[in-house]
Amino acid sequence: MSKPSLARGTRDFGPAQMAKRNYIFDTIRRIFQRYGFQPIETPAIENLSVLMGKYGDEGDQLLFKILNSGNFADGLTEAQWQEGYKKLTLKVSEKGLRYDLTVPFARFVVMNRSDLVMPFKRYQIQPVWRADRPQRGRYREFYQCDADVVGTDSLLCEAEIVLMIHEVLRGLGVMDFTVKINNRKILSGIAEIIGAPRQEGPMCVAIDKLDKIGKEKVEQELLERGFSAEAIEKLQPIYELANNQTHIFDNLRQWLAGSEIGSKGVAELEDVWIKVKNFGLPSPQLQLDVTLARGLSYYTGAIFEVKANGVQMGSISGGGRYDNLTGTFGMPGLSGVGISFGVDRIYDVMEELKLFPENQSITTQVMITNFDADAEAYGLGVLRQLREAGINAELYPDASKLKKQFDYADRKRIPYVLIIGSEEIQTGVLSLKNMHSGEQQKLTLAQILGNFV
RNA sequence: GAGGUUGUAGCUCAGUUGGUUAGAGCGUCGGAUUGUGGUUCCGAAGGCCGCGGGUUCGAGCCCCGUCUUCCUCCCCA
């Protein structure tokens, strides 16, 4: 017999943790619904043909792949065994665990296009799996809460995402955060302006590290990535833009005036800003960050990332606009924009900042004691009436010593214990003990029920 | 995927240059006038020292492998 263990990067959640997690889920779900999003769910398992190639080479490597059932090695030749694990994997595995909720959603849209009301606003709260190396705030199984809109180019969606992020985090008590926003078109424009068109990918990988490694090392990396000294010189304004938010739109517009796509990106972002302002969001925590790139693989417009300030934790939320995600499934031209909240990271942040309300885990309000068979029989009737009145109640299952029963109530933080012994059965007046204050009153059942209304 | 780090009772940790029977605190369980929890006192249970191999007369301690933990890189929620 071996000791049981958890798979790497996975966790159990006890009642106390579940109370906190549900508090987060409930808050996010409520706000998604308030913004008109409808729930869907998709399977944990997807065909690898759906998942592969959507997240880049590294993403493909981080996919959990499922071995084919039965004799997965059936028909494999010796030569195929020798080809290396990458090619072999595709022969012995054709399914995998979903890596995110966006790609399965794209598949869902394509497969259900005729039934969907466009623009389609859906939310989805489910776990995803990544064969990553676990670290702080990084797990192999974690929950994402996604809200996406497909079927419209309107920048109102971007603005609504900004609003939802603010409402969710403020609703959870996370007040100090920054919503970073950028636009892929701005990045494309910058690449054009510095004379390296379409090179925004490698450019971003380097620039993204600015606050981590500093300007000099970024420039060094740009050089290594094949950017000319001239291009790097032309990139100078970006460092000023990264540090100075005042008149940032004017400065950016001026810098990118010579690039059509860049100018469009600036105009789009400015429009989002105006819409957020028109909504009347109190003190937006919005920041234009021209170095924000994020994955870049499928984002074509806005790019979002949310950081909680004052804690060491990666982004707690991220998203953006993708113009052609369903294109890979044979349905081109459908634009979508969405946001994903990382519940597990939000949980860690809230735990560190002590933002969870007290007593979230109380489930039972009244526990009835159990003396003997007679008291139990009487208690069952009382139990029914308590429950019918909408009170969470339980009857202690064994006629144990009272000490033990009270200890149980205490440990479970049950606020009231109802004592029913021979005396109470005779008189019909029950003893209700407030476990917090220690006070005990004699009350009829009717009075007790009245107290809880 | 690369590099580092960690593992001893349910939990947090001691454990000497390798030397008899591996300890503490907290927790758990039992008891201290059989209808009253938190405090106190008494007592008890509980360890293949992560797992596998090696060196040695002898390994919790040294060596190798493996799993796990946490961290940096990569990437991300």
Image: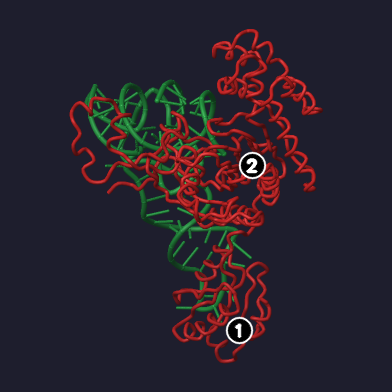
Chain colours: A red, B green
Q: Residue at x 42, y 33 (%)?
A: A60
Separation (CA) of disc 1 from disc 2: 65 Å
Q: Secondary structure at mark 2?
A: loop
At which x and y percent is residue A260? 69, 25
Q: Residue at x 51, y 39 (%)?
A: A332
In the image, residue B41 sits, relative to residue A181, either above or below, namely below
Furthest-bottom residue in view? A426
- Residue A336: x, y in percent? 58, 42
Which residue is nearer to you in this view: A27 or A323? A323
Task: Name which residue type carries label 1.
Answer: Leu
Label 1 marks which chain's residue? A
Among the 4 quarters of the image, the one containing residue A159 = top right
- Whether B27 is drawn above or below A338: the answer is below
- Asked whether, in this view, residue A427 is left or right of residue A4, the answer is right
Left or right side of A399 for A180: right
Pick the residue in front: A315 or A61.
A61
> What residue is disc 1 on?
A430
**Residue A7 image offset from top left, x and y in percent:** 39, 43
* Residue type pointed to by label 2: Asp
Counting residues from the N terminus, which is met first, the one under dot 1 or under dot 2?
Answer: 2
What count of labels does the image hold?
2
For label 2, the crowd category at 10 Å Cα-Cα, with few meaning under 14, some 14 to 19 and many 20 or more, is some
Instruction: Identify residue for label 2.
Output: A153
Quarter holding the C terminus of chain A?
A: bottom right
Q: Quadrant of residue A198?
A: top right
**Mark 1 and mark 2 on one chain:** yes
